[in-house]
Image (cartoon, coloured by chain):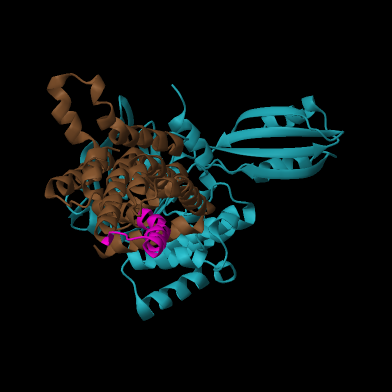
Amino acid sequence: MIHVEGITKYYGNFCAVDHINLDIQAGEIVGLLGPNGAGKTTTLRMLTGFFPPSAGNIQVKNYSIQQDPLAIKQLIGYLPESAPLYKSMIVYEYLDYVARIRGLSGEAKTGRLNALADMCGLRDIMHKTIDTLSKGLKQRVGLAHAMMSDPEILILDEPTSGLDPNQIVEIREIIRKIGEQKTVILSTHILREVEATCGRVVIINKGKIVADSDTHTLTAGHNRERRIQIDVLGADVQSLREQLESLSGVKAIQVAAAEEPHVIRACIVSGAEADIRPAVYAAVKQTNWILLEMRQEAETLEAIFRELTKEN
Amino acid sequence: MRQAALIFKKEFKDYFASPIAYIVIAIFLALTGWLFFSAFFIFDQADLRRFFNLMPLLLALVVPLITMRLFSEERNVGSYELLLTLPVTFRDIIVGKYLAAVAFVAAMLLPTLSYPIFISFIGDLDWGVAIAGYIGAVLLGAAYAAIGIFASSLTRNQIIACITAMVVCVVLSIMDQMLFFFPQSVLDVVGYVSANAHFANIAKGIVDSRDLIYFLSVVFLGLYATHLVMEEK
């Protein structure tokens, strides 16, 4: 569907994107992940034809970005970061304008506008000026803009940034629904977002791809250890440490007093292969201490991300 | 070109969605009305010559106010990104925006038609000269708008876009009155480049192809330069 070959972008002397290769199949939801300034937005802007790459080529279906930018723009729906819409326009007026530019008219246009109003929940705000909308609502109008032509490819730059938790859930829900039929590429620096919505994750750092695989493989492949945290009431630091050290499979233990009075907190690190939670429970049960809490910290994308993108 | 027409329609409507448009029109009408009519009865002549004499300088100051937002605002807000990722060409965008600005200039001149109508009641007005004057004014506005849209494409700051365009337009307007300062050898060139001289010819009632070509060249150069800037950025 999308074939990206060695695209590079220079801003003056600064290399924002450095020889990125990417192949995206139809129907994938790809999360482009990276710290701020890694080159995510630049990459997306080249994909959408906002500006041409300094070098390399992008092919969408059989069109090349150099020769048929218009044909590619027809195939792609794009929502830039923070949905920079025309502020002075009314939502309906704006969507109507976009529909016309996208070549819709008459019945087809009305039908599409209706469908999008339902899909993105715009029914109640159609008559409002864009300037007066909250960030979440603007984002939804932006999504409607991007999906106007029912594009085969949807590209979203930080679709949930600046939204409150409820809005984030709503937008993710919409994205997931779209992703059932379309190819979606979204960029974000929020890891949970990728885990929640994307089947495949591409991590970019300093303009280069540092990881590219499906989300599960990536998390599984990097899970080299488990972390378990327990809160125990009535123990003391020294004896809790001794009790836990004797367990097999334990690699490291940190024990310290927790914030609550009389509660000791221990962090236990073990190998990924063995689950030591039953053993920990049994060890505490032998004593007269009370186990208040035990949880396994998911060593997920968070850690992988930090590992792959940390400064050397 | 269908896309250009859609962009034209949107941009033209946008002008009237903000109060700035009405303020600009009001200032323009107040200035022309006052400057023209304050001495009209003293000269006691039923023509619009002194009205059209004001045009070059006045349009040089007003047209940049109209064109400054065309690109700068979109760049600044970021909507430029949305516009460029829609299936439209640079040419559609430039033509649509440019024609909207020219149409606005024409709309601004429209109420001043009341002057010749009024004068024709109290004296013997030569309508041919008046119409030529209006053609000249629209051409002049079109040339300045092309300079203005180019200035707007250069920067995301509307004020800078406005002042840049104003400086260029004012220089073109007053150049032929400063021939005194130029060396003999370049006088012809300076005289030709001056917008004022070409406009004055048309306003006299002589619609000469040389003057038309001058204005059309300025328009073409301005729009072509805008295209180059868009490709560059």
Residue B121 among those drawn in magenta: yes
**The chain in brown:** B
Where is residue B115, by image quadrant?
A: bottom left
- Residue B208 horizontal/vertical position (percent): 14, 50
- Left or right: where does residue A69 sit relative to residue B157? left
Relative image position of residue B30 (x, y in whole percent) = 50, 49
Say which residue appears at 52% left-offset and 63% top-offset.
A90
Please give left or right for residue B191 compared with residue A207 in the image: left
Residue at horizontal 18%, vertical 18%?
A: B183
Q: Where residue A273 sits in the image (x, y, percent)?
A: 51, 42
Magenta segment includes A2: no
Q: Where the C terminus of chain A falls, by quadrant? A: top left
Write down which chain is painted cyan.
Answer: A
Residue at 86% from the left image edge and 33% from the top image edge: A262
Which range is magenta? B105-127
Residue A272 visible (yes or no): no
Would you place residue A256 above or below residue A204 in this image? above
Query: Residue A248: image x %, image y %?
Result: 61, 34
Residue in the foreground of this view, choosing between A119 and A173: A119
In the rendered image, the vertical position of residue B114 relative to residue A159, given as above or below: below
Please tell me in which quadrant of the rendered image residue A258 appears: top right
